[in-house]
Amino acid sequence: MKTLYTAKATATGGRKGHVKTEDGPIDLPLSMPKGLGGDGGDGVNPEQLFGSAYSACFGSALGLVAEKHKVDLGDFSVTAHISINKDDEGLLLSAVLDSYLPGVSDIETAETLVNEAHEVCPFSKATRDNIDVTLNVLRDE
């Protein structure tokens, strides 16, 4: 395996601390969400950061797959909903990825693109068989 890029981020103080990347673009306070017993302060939380990263990565994968199929996605977007859930064994994550593909009028084509993107996206590969991921195609009504 050849490493193409490595990001380095350091969190201090856990969910109530601070997170910063080595090269500086991310330099943010962290806050515990009220749903997890925190004060819901102005800082970000790990689920927001993960959702931001997953939606961006999945969007890039969608773009690559669409290009391969010669499909114009239009002004597309991916929204990630990252949840912390609790079962008998403790806490676990789940994800819902809503893909809005206004350039794709055929639902079957849209679903094929989203499913293929899920196969090639590095975040999807990392989460496969580890967390529940639901894929949705959103359409204009």
Image (cartoon, rainbow, N blue to C red):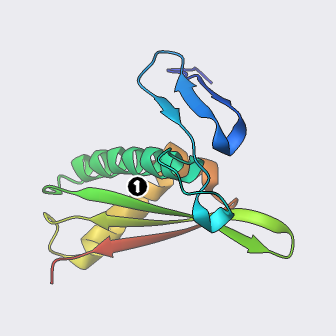
Instruction: Say which residue label 1 marks.
Output: 117
- Say if 120 sits above or below 131 in the image: above
Indicate the amino acid at tag 1.
Answer: Ala
Q: Quadrant of the N terminus?
A: top right
Marker count (numbered): 1
Expressed as whole percent of the image width and height from the top left, the position of residue 89 reads 86, 69
Q: Residues within 10 Å of mark 1 (few under 14, many from 20)?
A: many
Q: Quadrant of residue 99?
A: bottom left
Residue extending furthest toward the right: 89
Expressed as whole percent of the image width and height from the top left, the position of residue 137 reads 32, 72
Instruction: Pick whichever, 124 or 108, lies toward us.
Output: 124
Q: Quadrant of the C terminus?
A: bottom left
Circle 1: element type: helix
- Say if 137 sits above or below 41 in the image: below
- Residue at position x 41%, y 58% in the image: 116
Q: Quadrant of residue 71?
A: bottom left
| Left/right of residue 23 with respect to residue 87 in the rendered view | left
| Left/right of residue 51 with respect to residue 112 in the rendered view | right
- Residue at position x 36%, y 60% in the image: 79
Residue extending furthest toward the top: 23
- Residue at position x 47%, y 47% in the image: 42
Expressed as whole percent of the image width and height from the top left, the position of residue 115 reads 42, 64
- Residue at position x 76%, y 64% in the image: 91
Residue extending furthest toward the bottom: 141
| Left/right of residue 71 with respect to residue 113 in the rendered view | left
Instruction: Pick whichever, 105 or 28, lies toward us.
Output: 28
Instruction: Pick whichever, 22 or 73, lies toward us.
Output: 22
Expressed as whole percent of the image width and height from the top left, the position of residue 124 reads 54, 53
